[in-house]
Image: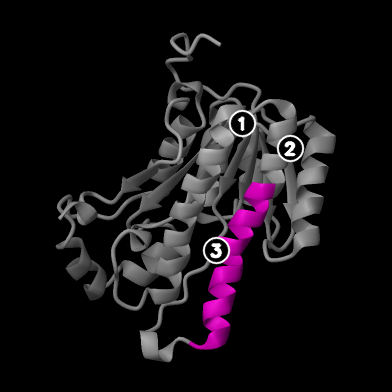
């Protein structure tokens, strides 16, 4: 393979991209951006993703929606098998599905702790493992996992969430170590607060304004900024980037 002659437009023409959590938020923005770059999209989410479907199909790309629970092994296996049956392979996996339940350490219940790990870390690992097996068979692929700045530095009320995101960052390193020789690239993206609909609801207030003052860029991020990074990491241009954690936080963690 000639690594110098990559598509300088970072296109994804004809790629088959599986995005978890693509019904809304960062996952939705990522699925749409990949479609605009020429990819066909497989959406795996708890809910139907009609808005995502409509936007993908407006781009003239194919859309396969699969409803399922990232915490259930049978749903993960079904999603991957259904995607491979329809498209022949999965070129790219984007792990976006996640939850964030914020509590002080002393108030975190066993249920909140376990649910956060089941969705964010274990779910991402099991989907990565299942898709990775297919990529090993098909000759390679790209995997991007959405982590968080909370996996890099400690944030108030983020103990469960932060631990899962730190786990994702380490999981990415381990998978890269074992899979890089097989033409599989896996990387993480760690954003600051991203202004999805949920982000707007939680951070469009005095607390949000105060938090922005701790960020050198003095602003939060947008879903499209994370999506753009995912498209780059899934492109041939990023073939030497493996096991990395790309922090998108306006400089919050540089101190």
Q: Tell me if label 1 and label 2 are in contact, CB under 8 Å.
A: yes
Q: Tell me if label 3 and label 1 are in contact, CB under 8 Å.
A: no
User: How far is the residue under mark 3 from the one under mark 1?
Assistant: 22 Å
User: How far is the residue under mark 2 from the one under mark 3?
Assistant: 22 Å
Q: Which numbered disc, 1 or 2, marks the residue that appears first in the sequence?
A: 2
Q: Is residue 240 left or right of residue 123?
A: left
Reply yes or no: does residue 122 show up in magenta. Answer: yes
Residue drawn where x is 70% and y is 57% of the image: 48
Q: Residue 134 bears which disc, if any?
A: 2
Please state the horizontal and vertical placement of residue 5, each as a whole percent of the image. 47, 9
Please state the horizontal and vertical placement of residue 105, each as a whole percent of the image. 37, 85
Residue drawn where x is 37% and y is 56% of the image: 194
Decide if residue 50 is in sight here.
Answer: no
Give residue 93's quadrant in the image: top right
Crowd band around label 2 with a 10 angstrom C-alpha radius: few (<14), some (14–19), many (20+): some
Residue lying furthest right in this view?
85
Residue drawn where x is 82% and y is 44% of the image: 82
Query: How was this image coloured?
Result: one colour
Q: Tell me if label 2 and label 3 are in contact, CB under 8 Å.
A: no
Crowd band around label 3 with a 10 angstrom C-alpha radius: few (<14), some (14–19), many (20+): many
Q: Residue 120 bears which disc, if any?
A: 3
Q: Residue 14 bears which disc, if any?
A: none
Q: Is residue 140 left or right of residue 190?
A: right
Q: Is residue 206 left or right of residue 11?
A: left
The magenta stretch is 109-129
- Placement of 53 over or under 106, stated as above or below: above
Q: Residue 141 bears which disc, if any?
A: 1
Secondary structure of the residue carrying tag 2 is helix
- Placement of 15 over or under 83, stated as above or below: above
Please state the horizontal and vertical placement of residue 215, each as a whole percent of the image. 18, 57
Reply yes or no: does residue 196 show up in magenta. Answer: no
């Amino acid at each position: 393979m000639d690594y110098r002659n990559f598509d300088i437009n970072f296109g994804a023409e004809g790629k088959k991209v599986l995005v978890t959590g693509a019904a809304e938020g960062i996952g939705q923005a990522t699925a749409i951006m990949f479609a605009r770059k020429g990819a066909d999209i497989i959406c795996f989410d708890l809910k139907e993703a009609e808005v995502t479907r409509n936007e993908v199909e407006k781009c003239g790309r194919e859309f396969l929606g699969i409803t399922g629970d990232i915490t259930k092994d049978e749903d993960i296996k079904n999603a991957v098998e259904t995607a491979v049956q329809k498209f022949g392979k999965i070129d790219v996996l984007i792990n976006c599905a996640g939850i964030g339940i914020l509590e002080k350490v002393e108030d975190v219940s066993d249920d909140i702790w376990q649910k956060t790990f089941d969705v964010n870390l274990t779910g991402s690992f099991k989907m990565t493992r299942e898709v990775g097996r297919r990529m090993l068979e098909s000759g390679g692929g790209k995997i991007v996992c959405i982590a968080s700045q909370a996996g890099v530095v400690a944030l108030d009320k983020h103990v469960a969430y932060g631990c899962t995101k730190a786990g994702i960052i380490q999981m990415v390193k381990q998978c890269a170590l074992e899979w890089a020789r097989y033409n599989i690239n896996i990387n993480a993206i760690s954003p600051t607060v991203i202004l999805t609909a949920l982000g707007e609801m939680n951070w469009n207030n005095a607390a949000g304004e105060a938090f922005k003052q701790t960020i050198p860029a003095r602003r939060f991020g947008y879903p499209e900024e994370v999506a753009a990074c995912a498209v780059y990491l899934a492109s041939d241009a990023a073939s030497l980037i493996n096991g990395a954690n790309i922090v998108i936080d306006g400089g919050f963690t540089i101190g």
